[in-house]
Image (spheres, rainbow, N blue to C red):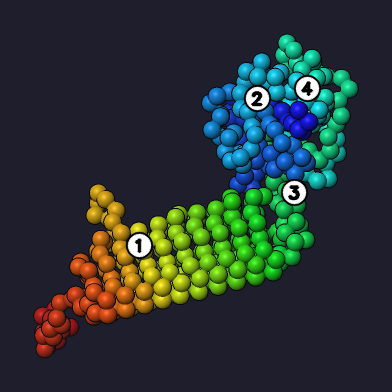
Amino acid sequence: MDQNRAVIFLTTSPDPEQKKPLMLKDILFCPILTWVVRKLKRDGVERFFVVCGPQYTDEVRACFPADADAVISDEHPKLLDFVSGARRVIVISRPVVPAKQAGEGYVYSAEGSALAEGWQKAATVFLQNVDGERGWIALNSDADIQNVELHLRDEIVAEHLANGVRILDPKAVYIDPRVEIGRGTMVLPGTILRGATRIGQDCVIGPNAMVRDCTVGDESEVNASQINESSIGWRTHVGPFAYVRPNCRIGDDIKVGDFVEVKNSTIGDGTKISHLTYVGDSDVGKKVNFGCGTVTTNYDGFKKYRCTIGDESFIGCNTNLVAPVRVGKGSYIAAGATITKDVPEDALAVARVQQENKDGWAARRRKMHGK
């Protein structure tokens, strides 16, 4: 019973235009409630009770770490049981967001027994003899969210700068509070880092990059590209103008170049996908070379299929790999091929119509049109 606890009221707005509580809206891509939970955990709170209706239970649960001790309920007896006998309870009775420079107000703490007694009939009763908590700003509307957002952006940027991250233009980047960035990494203008993203040391992110819910290894670069819900290894170069869609595992020393799209695929170490290529639903080995214009044709209009491409294979330009197909280790595919059958190891696959030249055809056509 000595654990620090917190009670958070998810009050609904009196504004009929508001579709849900302000605490579930985003500031810098992150629900305000997540900001609140992160600060409370840093301050030593171990148990939480969120007062809200069942229609918001899933959204509220997503704002807590998976292992957090959190009760989400609007049942009054459960609330009284939660606070009874607790040594100290922090109470957040209205929408707030943490801010380092804010003074007291809007958030208070009290003995659990005092709360249980005061809230015996209703949790809305105002209590005497409570302690004000510093570091919180009240929110009343979407306009308040917008007003505080840039201030919080600057606070987050300052934290990363203090930790050895280089940010060329602090006013031109937007970083979710959940993001971790390693020392020595350079974040260039136009970069947006979102969700549970972890960037390694000595990376270059940007300019104009968006990274969401990804892991990026040390010494890697993401240049003018978007990567989503995927992992990028060490010393890997992504972009410019690449698009990494969810569920990709891209290894070390890889190039994912300009106008390349990768989706739901595993890419082995040392592979080069330099430009104008689509790799979807594929398992690609190590040190594979993709020629320009290669496409894994993974969809037949009804179902997705996977390609498997062995280590050290060489895919010529303008190749179509019609899944499901396997390309053996060390094999070559001639440029312009459409591959519909498996390619054995160390083989050369040629799948194109033999060239035929019709002498004088172009001249006759021009003459026919009076040219």
Q: Say left or right for 305 vs 70.
A: left
Tell me which residue sits at (37%, 67%) in the image. 284
Instruction: Look at mark 2 in the image and give the residue it sits on.
Output: 51
Q: Position of residue 68 (x, y in %)?
A: 64, 38
Q: Are marks 2 and 4 in contact (CB under 8 Å)?
A: no
Total marks drawn?
A: 4
- Say which residue appears at 15% left-offset and 77% top-offset: 353
Badge 1 amino acid: Ser
Gap in angstroms between the C-alphas marked 3 and 2: 28 Å
**Residue at point 67%, 28% (across, down):** 49
Q: Amino acid at mark 2?
A: Val
Earlier in the chain: of badge 1 and badge 4, it is: 4
* Measured Cα–Cα span from mark 2 to mark 4: 19 Å
Q: Is residue 290 visible?
A: no
28 vs 118: above or below = below
User: In whole angstroms, how far apart are the C-alphas of marks 1 and 4?
Assistant: 57 Å
Question: In the rendered image of this protein, does residue 79 appear above or below residue 134?
Answer: above
First reached walking from the N terminus: tag 3 or tag 4: 4
Identify residue for label 4.
85
What is the quadrant of the C terminus in the image?
A: bottom left
Q: In the structure shown, which secondary structural element does the residue marked by tag 2 occupy?
A: strand
Front residue (pair 287, 323): 287
Do the residues bearing badges 3 and 4 touch, measured as CB atoms within 8 Å? no
Please name which of the two marks, 3 or 2, marks the residue nearer to the observer: 2
Residue 151: numbered disc: 3
User: Residue 36's quadrant in the figure?
Assistant: top right
Real-space Cα distance between discs 1 and 3? 43 Å
